[in-house]
Image (tube, grey):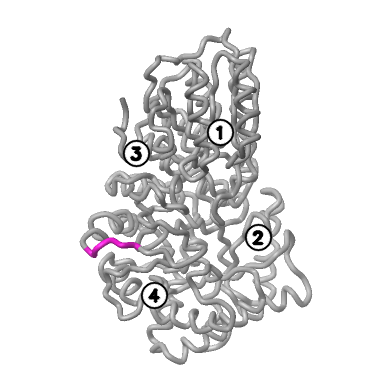
Amino acid sequence: MGIDEIGQRLMLAFRGFQCPDGKPLDDLLAYCPAGFTFFRSFNIESPAQLRQLTADLSQAAQRNGLPPFLFALDQEGGQLMAAGNCTQLPGNMALGAANDPALAELAGQVLGRELSAMGINVDYAPCVDVNVNPRNPVVGVRSFGEDPQAVAALTAAMIRGIQSQGVAATAKHFPGHGDTATDSHLSMSLVSHSLTQLERIDLVPFQTAVENDVKLVMTGHLGLPALGLEKLIPATLAPEVLQGLLRQRCHFSGVVITDAMDMKAIQQGEELRHEVSRALQAGADLLLMTTEAADHRRAFQGLADAYAAIPHETFRASLQRIHDLKEWLQLQRLDTPLEVIRCQEHQQVARRIAEAALTKVRDRQQLLPLNPSEQVAVILPQPGDLTPADTSSYVHIQLAESLHQYMPSVAEKLISLDPDDSEITAALQFASHYDTVVIGTINAASNSGQARLVRELQVRHPRLIVAALRLPYDLSAFPEVGTYLCTYSILDPSMAALAAGLVGAIPFPGKLPVTLPGLVKTD
């Protein structure tokens, strides 16, 4: 078996918005990789530029006699959109609040169609983790919710939608990242579930994904004490997980890809070579590498180590799964024009999801709907990337602009995610001049300054409306708030829907897809 076959188990990455040339390209192609993962900050400026990049890389593969490349990125909708300037789909928890598989399938179709137009053939989506831990720092609104059966139904629908457009979907993060209190980008996250709980909760959506012919499953760098291993290791490196739970228990016959191998749950530096070999021996087919050339070298050394250690028929079976995926993609390939991106039809899907998700948890003082003659203060935190799996920092929240379409007197004040005393004082002074205050929150339960500002406004302002723009769990930081709404997304369609709901132009049909600790779901 030659380098041209061994390298097919690598997904590489590089920095640059154009196809490398000369030695940088030669260095990448020397590994004969399966393909490339693209990152927003490193590789993506616009849909047209990304389409050209994938076309140029495809031509390079042909010139060098390599198999067609896989081109992949994280395009989940909501907080994680690696390709910007695409239709702003509100994301999974919004779909969970809408609880309509037909909308989830439409969302998948939009994702798949727009990716296809840019030359992308693998979407690292959907995230099918069952979010049962309110303190989960990395999944949150990326999840459809906390009910395994509801998550499974939406998972199946989104996979159907994505794959109907000739793009391979990826169910992640196996065996389930929904009940962790740490971010696996930063350390190995522990899942304290028993094997019975795993079966009853975490594995349910993955089993459904397999039954709906999902093409890839991504591993999570998760520790599972319930496995009773002598040493706790990430699931990515555990044959008990990849071969036992995924292949044998869930009967998955497709491609297993690791989560990014530069995450801190995986040993780095020269140890990465050994981690790569362990992942392959555990049962991973593809290794998701990032941009560092030294790590590419270490990964290939680990590949060679694994090839020497793994029975050749097992190694070839893995290569065959990758070949079968590429063959499926070639058969499904669609010539999708760039004009579909942000087209009217797709924008309507995004707006339908945002409106169906809009949730009124309570309105005790009956402040809604707003009167158009009211003077309204809108206070908003400036969004940022709260985890590495986040592209929120690219977003300007359009609530005030959307509300101004219905009301002439709307003023906006921006605050930081965790405002200090001076910002809080300034925001309170600002709010005192208006009839009604609408404050948006972003993860206020973990940003004490936001929570303190809301509590101060409760005391000082009789007409306060709080809208959780991301995690619905924010209410736990100020449980006495009388009017509390949820959008699950800061993107434009969700802000347009919220504005329409505030003035009574549309209802609030959404239902909380998670339980708020110590609080009833609705009043």
List the single residue furthest toward the left. 196
Residue of label 3: 516
The 10 Å Cα crowd at callout 3, few under 14, some 14 to 19, many 20 or more, is: some
- Reading the image, the residue beneath label 2 is 54
Residues marked 1 and 2 touching at CB (< 8 Å): no
Q: Considering the numbered disc 4 on the image, is that residue within a helix, a strand or a loop?
A: loop
> Circle 1 — which element?
helix
Marks 4 and 2 sit apart, C-alpha to C-alpha, by 36 Å
Q: Is residue 297 positioned above or below 430 on the image?
A: below
Note whether residue 503 is visible: yes
Residue range in magenta is 191-195
Q: Rounded to the nearest whole Å, what is the CA distance between mark 2 and mark 3?
A: 43 Å
Q: Is there CB contact under 8 Å for labels 4 and 3?
A: no
Q: Residues within 10 Å of mark 1 (few under 14, many from 20)?
A: some
Q: CA distance from mark 3 to mark 1?
A: 31 Å
For mark 4, what is the residue?
A: 233
Q: Is residue 287 magenta?
A: no
| For marks 3 and 1 on the same chain, the one whose residue lies earlier in the sequence | 1
